[in-house]
Amino acid sequence: MMLKSRASLPDYLTHLQAGGRVSFTRGEALEAVRLSDAAFLKSAARLRRKHMLLSPRHGFYVVVPPQFLSWEAPPPSWYIDDLMRHEGRPYYVGLLKAAELHGATHHAVMEFQVVTDRQLPKIRAGRSYIVFYFRKEMEPVLSAVERRKTDTGSMAVSSVELTCLDLIRYVHGAGGFDAVATVLVDLGEKIDGEKLALIAPHFERATVQRLGYLLDHLGHAAAAEALHRQLFEQSSVPWVKLDPARRKDKIVSTQGEPAEKNARWRVVVQHLPEIDE
């Protein structure tokens, strides 16, 4: 994508948008526009002050189209694929954002949530944040990742089944078990039980138990049964709490019986999930 040798950086941004792109690297810009590195950085800084350019990572830039100037950034879906390619990391859009893309409507999505194999700091992208969740081994679940079209290309998104397991695994990032149960009300009928059982072995056993209990509790018997067959092929399944406490939280011990001790999933339910209507 070469421009005339004396074109300016703003001309380059216009040229990119005309071709349906909103992101580029510093190397690409320097190759396309005859500017010194110092002149490029000065011009880029000027555009950033005007909120016409965003730099979510060193050496990676996002053009802010006029219709998004008040937001100071276009939607992350427009550039997440290019950003993660720039980072050199496998990824998929997951958790509540993926649930929204699959049709969940009950829960407002405040973050653009991404799962990848490196612990990355969150990115402020205008008025929103891109938040990264760490998964050490990505390869085993990539078969459950789909491509979704975006206004500028496509992005990787977790399937319904992978989304549901991730919502349990990263439950505090999803707003807690009440919020997850509410999302499962929307997604439950879309779950393919056999697909769910295929990827379940790549999650912690406790995650599978908790999801199975919730699916049964919400009336999604077919998906729950496939998961139950997969899980209880193992010889021994210990009891787990439905709502695990975060390590950093200070736990105050309380007396009293749990709301339920579910023998089918071997899950101790401290309180029954409350669904937002």
Image (spheres, grey):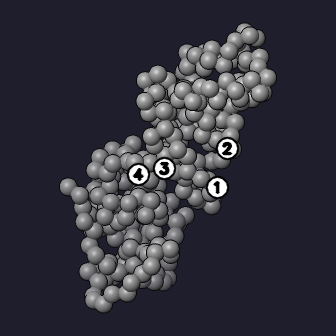
Q: CA distance from mark 3 to mark 2?
A: 16 Å
**Lower position in the chain sequence, tag 1 or tag 3:** 3
In the current view of this chain or complex, which residue is farthest to the bottom? 255
**Lower position in the chain sequence, tag 1 or tag 4:** 4
Residue 214: % across, % down: 32, 67
**Lower position in the chain sequence, tag 1 or tag 2:** 2
Say what amino acid the circle numbered 3 marks: Gln
**Lower position in the chain sequence, tag 4 or tag 2:** 2
Q: CA distance from mark 1 to mark 4?
A: 20 Å
Look at the numbered discs 4 and 3 and tell me whether their residues touch, using CB distance below 8 Å.
Answer: yes
**Lower position in the chain sequence, tag 3 or tag 2:** 2
The residue that mark 3 highlights is 113
The residue that mark 1 highlights is 118
Residue at 43%, 30% in the rendered image: 70
The residue that mark 2 highlights is 87
Look at the numbered discs 1 and 2 and tell me whether their residues touch, using CB distance below 8 Å.
Answer: yes
The residue that mark 4 highlights is 96
